[in-house]
Image: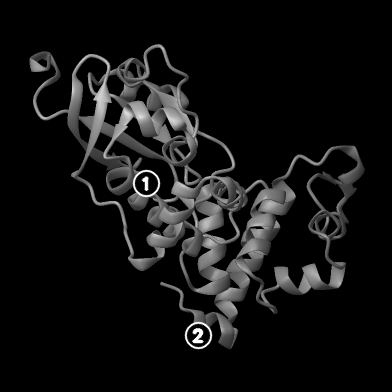
Amino acid sequence: MTTARQVASGAPDQKEQFQALLVRCRLAVEAGPPEAAITTRGRRRTGLSQERTASMLGVSVRSYGDFERGLIRREPEFLDRVASVLHMSAHERHVMFLLSTGQEPPQPFTRQLDSVPAYQLALDSSVLPGYLSNHCWDIELTNQAFREVWAGRELPTNVLRYILMSEEAREEVLLDWETGWALPFLRQQRAAMNTAPWAQGLIELQRELEDTARSDKRLRKLMKRSTDDEYVHPNGDTRLINHPKWGPTRITLLMTRPLDAASAYRFVWLVPPKPVDEMP
């Protein structure tokens, strides 16, 4: 694996790989007629120029040129802006981070949700309640069994927002709300913020939590308590839930991720204590 020390020392092969990656991605962008250029051999070439790329990134042409040649290091936020402007795939972004910083990307690239039909089929093939969420806790896809848990109620669109800020969740759906749900998920949110402090979705969610806590004494006290300990959600954790068909039930939460290591999406399954067909 490329190391940060090797990048900093300016190993020629790494600089060349880095430049080749960015140039290839930059010239592959469908930029339209204004970006078309005539090469010295008279052939028309499309793609983004360095000038146009620098403008889109809000930096000088010289600064971007030095960056593209691997002469300067930039922060993760800038690398993600480059990945977006150059329409990089998750794999290309991953390689860019390794060559630039010597480290894995701090947060998976989630510009768009790929393979929706396959993800939905995986959910629909299960009798267990399940959903697909992103790194900001937004619920992207669900199955029928999951929707039945909220029969007659509004379906949650964001896991953390529902657990921590919904009065219905506290009083009717999530049993043992304070210690079983709220505290662990507050700690998970804090861990997520520490991992990706630049993620806009997490920043907005944290701001909303803090705003809500100003008038919600119960949540405010829990947010203070949540800083006393660390917590990362382990597979096999159990929670109490009031299921509309099963009644008060201790469910097990299982999480899986797609095989694509760069994906931030995760499947979450709510598993009852015995097979679904044996539940009440």
Q: Which residue is mark 2?
A: 5
Q: Residue at x 62, y 72 (%)?
A: 16
Q: Is 249 on the left or on the right of 120, as rendered?
A: left
What SS does tag 1 mark? Answer: helix
In the image, residue 134 above or below residue 210: above
Residue 105 seen: no
Density class for disc 1 (Cα within 10 Å; few <14, some 14-19, many ≥20) is: many
The quadrant in which the N terminus is found is: bottom left
Residue 238 seen: yes
Q: Amino acid at mark 2?
A: Arg
Q: Is 165 on the left or on the right of 44, as rendered?
A: left
What SS does tag 2 mark? Answer: helix
In the image, residue 267 above or below residue 126: below
Q: Residue at x 87, y 59 (%)?
A: 51
Query: Can you tell which mark lies on residue 182?
Result: 1
> Residue 36 appears at what percent x and percent y?
87, 44
For this orientation, the residue located farthest to the bottom is 9
Q: Quadrant of residue 11?
A: bottom right
> Residue 174 appears at what percent x and percent y?
32, 33
Name the foreground residue: 47 vs 155: 155
Q: Is 127 on the left or on the right of 187, as rendered?
A: left
Q: Residue at x 56, y 76 (%)?
A: 13
